[in-house]
Image: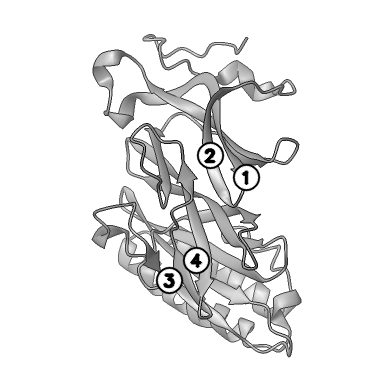
Amino acid sequence: MSKFQDTLIRLSRETAEAQIPEDRLAKNAVFIKTLVSSLKTHTSFAYPFDSLKNVSVVKSPDNAFRIFSWFVRINESYRFFGAIQMATKDGSLQLFPLIDGTDNISDVNIITNNKNWYGARYYEIVPVQNGKQPYYVLLGWKGNNEKTTKKVMDVLSFEKNEPILGKTVFEGTKSGNAKNRVVFEYNKLNSMTLTLDRTVNMIVFDHLAPFSDDLVGNYEYYASDLSFDAYKIANGKLKLIENIELKNDPNQMDDFYIDPKDKTTKAVKKL
């Protein structure tokens, strides 16, 4: 398996370094073929692929599956690639490819499957118990374009052993309607926290706000306003709670925070 990983590292690097999109996609196709071959190796599920830095490999906390996800830069946008590898009792391969269908998804709230995936590079999997069969909240980075960045909270569940993406579990929205998926969009020069806080069993995130009231809906001018919201996990659902109190340890990056209401866009220190 280490030989496979070495080859994958080389192919991943060549993909990133290719100068034109067509060459990147061609190199990426070879990378995908090699990855699938490596996963066909018996008991490959146990191999971490932890040296494959350009690819996110995240295993569910219950060890039921893991997700490989990555992107290829296409001019000022991104195309995402991935696969769900299931754990099997005999160590054989069970793999679901993730096919990025972002360009064909006009409504981000629709429920899809692995063949019409709202692509993202996932970095955390949060299991939620809902009766006998849990579902999994996927936290991911989606990129977007030269002006804005997106992050995503998607939901993975399995019906008749097939993956389903999106589920009506996000409650408490201002519209009153539960959501199947949550997408955040904000200024590309800013960052956004989106992670599970295990101490309070909530998925916490920066509250995003426009630089001024007349820019509402223009996400190029959205950033954190220093407050936090969260989705609290309870009774198999995720309930939106706004303006929560967090006690964060000091962070050396705080000095570089950009206040969205500071029209000078100079770095200011968090208080």
| Of callouts 2 and 4, the N-terminal one | 4
Work out how far the residue at label 4 is from the one at label 3, CA to CA, in angstroms: 27 Å
Find residue 114 and name its label. Answer: 3
Work out how far the residue at label 1 is from the one at label 2, CA to CA, in angstroms: 7 Å
Count of marks, rendered view: 4
Crowding around mark 1 (Cα neighbors within 10 Å: few <14, some 14 to 19, many 20+) is few
Find residue 234 and name its label. Answer: 1
How was the colour assigned to the protein in this rendering?
one colour
Q: Three-letter amino acid code at disc 4?
A: Glu
Side of 39 relative to 153 (left or right): right
Q: Quadrant of residue 195?
A: top right
- Pointers 1 and 2 in contact (C-beta within 8 Å): yes
Q: Residue at x 31, y 67 (%)?
A: 22
| Of callouts 1 and 2, the N-terminal one | 1
Crowding around mark 3 (Cα neighbors within 10 Å: few <14, some 14 to 19, many 20+) is many
Work out how far the residue at label 1 is from the one at label 3, CA to CA, in angstroms: 27 Å
